Image (spheres, helix red, strand yellow):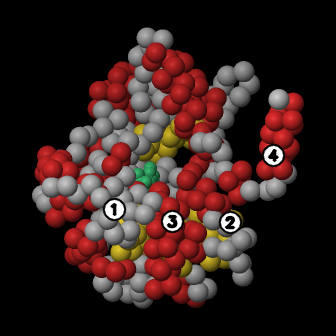
């Protein structure tokens, strides 16, 4: 018995003595908040789930039917690792007609386990040890984490409310070093809701050309955009060929978050080959039945997506109105995505001397039963902020606003 214990301890020590890239990334801050929310809920408290971005909507009936039919038809076996041909073709057509990206052919499209997996294989394909990738700061946490998992260094480009949280070429250029490989753009942006316009994207593409860098364009929220604004894909701009890796998700556009499907498109043959190898050795293809649902989602009626967007805009306006009543938060009006990013007023008295995003998140939970995410988990520029997600059911937002009004 003694020898077993000793050998276990020795093994644990030999693992912990060696640096490992996975140890560089945290377990996930929002998970901590979610656990507390669930704990409060179990104690009988009413809690409003504004902490994470999971669409409250059901999937469209034609998507459900396509998945059920795929199961009835026996499509329950391994598929081509890069995606079934019908889906790759449908994505290729969508990229060509909706995003206006002139990708070479359907072989330059890869079906992934959500945009998360697309980011993982992208950075693994792009980075060697210590190479740098410029990411927005604040950023969706997992973007920077996936750069680190690939052995790369995520270099934050600080954005502020004064410039509408837009990552511009002028802000990015001073961060470029001989080790920089790529610039990550995320429009519409999580967590701020900023949307990059055509000119900003044109300038960033020109910068990438000048420094021979790749652009990684995370467009997971391409359909969640307000006030009639246009979503522009940087891959559609002149000169984008071979320089842009475009990433999309079904999670937000079609409320298919749990079905785990996304895709990545790129004209660079070597990168595509690397990403195909990584897909084979990580997931070996997305769930077969889901892929049939994904064809139906892209080729069928788009009214569900349009309707969700209308509801999101209504929720955004409702939540903003409620937050504007709170003197200790300064919310930023999002042009897209389903988050309100809010700065904590320095005059807020805090809890136990703490005035950071974590303190605010806990205070909002205890005082109003309202979930949020602390800005600190989104990077250095997130300090002193909180993020509210309005992807939850409208009645959660109505009840949160009613609680704020009673303040
Ligand atoms: C900016 C951004 N990119 C990518 C994703 C990943 O989406 P999924 O893996 O569900 O497709 C998310 C999810 O919240 C996100 O906010």
Q: Distance between the residues labelled 1 and 3?
A: 14 Å
Q: Which one is nearer the viewer's eye here, 244 or 358?
A: 244
Say which label, 4 or 1, has the lower sequence index: 4
**Quarter of the image where one finds residue 312:** top left
At mark 4, the secondary structure is helix
Say which label, 4 or 3, has the lower sequence index: 4
Q: Mark 1 points at which residue?
A: 78
Residue furthest top in the image? 44
Give the crowd class for mark 2: few <14, some 14-19, many >=20 residues within 10 Å.
many
Give the crowd class for mark 3: few <14, some 14-19, many >=20 residues within 10 Å.
few
Return the x and y of residue 221 as percentages of the image width and height: 37, 56
Say which label, 1 or 2, has the lower sequence index: 1
Say which label, 3 or 2, has the lower sequence index: 2
Q: Is mark 2 within 8 Å of ligand 1?
A: no
Numbered label attached to residue 151:
2
Q: Name the residue under label 3.
A: 281
What's the residue at 50%, 61% (across, down)?
Answer: 282
Say which label, 1 or 3, has the lower sequence index: 1
């Amino acid at each position: 018995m003694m020898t077993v214990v000793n050998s276990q301890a020795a093994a644990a020590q030999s693992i912990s003595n060696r640096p490992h890239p996975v140890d560089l990334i945290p377990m996930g801050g929002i998970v901590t908040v979610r656990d507390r929310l669930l704990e409060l809920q179990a104690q009988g408290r009413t809690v409003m789930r504004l902490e994470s971005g999971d669409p409250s909507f059901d999937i469209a009936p034609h998507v459900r039917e396509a998945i059920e039919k795929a199961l009835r038809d026996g499509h329950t076996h391994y598929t081509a690792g890069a995606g079934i041909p019908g889906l790759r073709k449908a994505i290729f057509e969508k990229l060509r007609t909706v995003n206006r990206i002139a990708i070479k052919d359907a072989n330059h499209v890869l079906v992934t386990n959500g945009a998360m997996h697309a980011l993982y294989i992208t950075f693994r394909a792009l980075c060697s040890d210590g190479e740098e990738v410029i990411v927005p700061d604040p950023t969706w946490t997992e973007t920077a984490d996936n750069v680190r998992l690939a052995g790369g260094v995520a270099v934050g480009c600080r954005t502020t409310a004064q410039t509408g949280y837009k990552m511009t070429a002028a802000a990015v250029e001073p961060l470029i070093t001989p080790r920089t490989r790529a610039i990550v753009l995320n429009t519409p942006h999580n967590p701020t809701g900023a949307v990059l316009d055509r000119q900003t994207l044109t300038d960033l593409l020109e910068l990438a050309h000048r420094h021979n860098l790749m652009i990684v364009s995370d467009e997971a929220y391409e359909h969640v955009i307000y006030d009639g604004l246009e979503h522009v894909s940087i891959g559609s701009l002149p000169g984008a060929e071979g320089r842009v890796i475009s990433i999309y998700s079904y999670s937000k556009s079609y409320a298919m978050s749990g079905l785990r499907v996304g895709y990545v498109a790129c004209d660079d043959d070597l990168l595509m080959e690397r990403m195909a190898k990584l897909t084979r050795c990580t997931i070996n293809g997305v769930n077969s039945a889901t892929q049939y649902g994904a064809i139906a989602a892209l080729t069928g009626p788009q009214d569900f997506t349009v309707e969700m967007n209308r509801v999101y805009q209504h929720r955004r306006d409702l939540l903003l109105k409620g937050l504007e009543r709170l003197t200790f938060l300064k919310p930023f009006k999002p042009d897209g995505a389903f988050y309100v990013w809010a700065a904590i007023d320095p005059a807020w008295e805090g809890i136990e001397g703490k005035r950071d995003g974590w303190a605010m998140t806990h205070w909002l939970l205890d005082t109003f039963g309202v979930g949020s995410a602390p800005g600190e988990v989104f990077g250095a520029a997130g300090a002193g902020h909180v993020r509210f997600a309005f992807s939850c059911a409208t009645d959660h937002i109505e009840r949160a606003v009613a609680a704020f009004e009673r303040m």
